Amino acid sequence: MGQMIKVGMADLKVCKAPDNLTTIGLGSCIGIAMYDPVSKVTGLAHIMLPDSTAIRANSNIAKFADTGIQKLLDDMIKAGASKARIKAKIAGGAKMFDVGNSNMINVGERNAIASREKLKKLGIPLIAEDCGKNFGRTVEIYSESGEFLIKAVGRDTYKI
Amino acid sequence: MSEKLSLEEINQKYPDVLREIGNIGAGNATTAIASMLSLRMNMSVPSVEFLPVEEMSTALGSEDAVIAGIMLGVSGDIGGSMMFLLDLPSAKNLANHMMSMMGGPPIAEEDFLDEEKSMMARSAIQEIGNIIAGAYLNAIASMTNLTITPTPPFVAFDTAASILSVPAIIFGSEGDNALLIRTEIDDEAIDERIRGYYFLMPEGDSYQKILSSLGLPV
């Protein structure tokens, strides 16, 4: 049995089977899991915001969909993954509170859109996703199978 | 209009002002909730701290512990939002005080996780959030002579990390740090402790307006 390695908020990590990756409590943030089924190199990013170019405080590249996904891909290739084989799954981007008077509130949806766009631009197929709604998600990506497990409070665990 | 000050710059220029806004708001909120629930409460001096947004998911303790989050928008002379957070034991204690006043049955902690069972508890927490946030904002409004109107509150019970992602994103889109106000309220009679946390998230030049209306040059 490998280790379950934790990825924090605005953080990203890469591992190899038998190790696996998890991130806890994706609210409006997005968890981007990428894996290479042959080399079993796997990566997980926990991004908070869609666009690093829109913000002054952008020194942490793992905080943003655009720069975070790029870095995750680069790190995976360095660890032995082949770009042509890498597939992606994403989860999160919830609207935790239905407050309507601020454009920050829809940031979950904007995070999901930005993540899909960045993956498309990089040519990484997005093969499954579970985004939106109004609840937080804890996710686990398994390097051996590419299974992406999603846990939420008061709901059954499911995988995509 | 002057260049927008960051939270860090405001804190550097006027180190006591953010603390004082935290104190006065939290003090007023505690008095309001104590009088509504007829409790004898002691409030500790609120602590006001800056923390990097990356560390927010653990600001209240375990990141996967379920907490109650109450969020509302603010409009009027200033704009933005505020949040009031309670750990689950505190939410349960407050909700049960309210339920017993209304003659309802007490709620167990695990019932909060079940959407159907927790309907009453959720609306109790929503009402408590309404009173707390209203009192908090009233204190700031009367201190500054600004008109501050809250929207109705929204309640979520979820993992701390999920709920805290919301203020983390709002603060994170402006800078690297969040401003957290912690309060602890002790109920003298029943030896109960209620831990509450506030995030004030003024938008745009709202902080400047608050500082100017306090007579501070920005």
Image (cartoon, coloured by chain):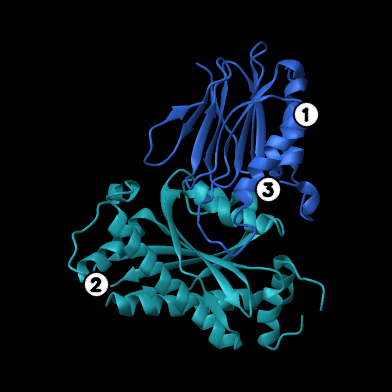
Chain colours: A blue, B cyan
- Crowd band around label 2 with a 10 angstrom C-alpha radius: few (<14), some (14–19), many (20+): few
Which mark's residue is nearer the viewer, 2 or 1?
A: 1
SS for dot 3: loop
Q: CA distance from mark 2 to mark 1?
A: 62 Å
Q: CA distance from mark 3 to mark 1?
A: 18 Å
Residue at the spot of label 3? A49
Residue at the spot of label 1? A122
Q: Residue at x 53, y 18 (%)?
A: A2
SS for dot 1: helix
Residue at the spot of label 2? B189
In this rendering, position of residue B192 left or right of residue B56: left
Q: Quadrant of residue B193?
A: bottom left
Q: CA distance from mark 2 to mark 3?
A: 46 Å
Q: Is residue A47 at least partly visible in the picture?
A: no
Say which chain tag 2 marks: B
The percent coordinates of residue A46 (x first, y second) are 63, 39
Say which chain tag 1 marks: A
Say which chain tag 3 marks: A
SS for dot 2: loop
The percent coordinates of residue A152 (x first, y second) are 44, 39
In this rendering, position of residue B190 left or right of residue A106: left
Q: Name the amino acid type tagged 1.
A: Leu
Q: Nearer the viewer, residue A14 or A3?
A: A14
Is residue B138 depicted above or below A96 in this figure? below
The percent coordinates of residue B205 (x first, y second) are 72, 73
- Crowd band around label 3 with a 10 angstrom C-alpha radius: few (<14), some (14–19), many (20+): many
Q: Nearer the viewer, residue B61 or A58?
A: A58
Q: Name the amino acid type tagged 3.
A: Leu
Q: Name the amino acid type tagged 2.
A: Ala
- Crowd band around label 1 with a 10 angstrom C-alpha radius: few (<14), some (14–19), many (20+): few
Q: Are marks 3 and 1 on the same chain?
A: yes
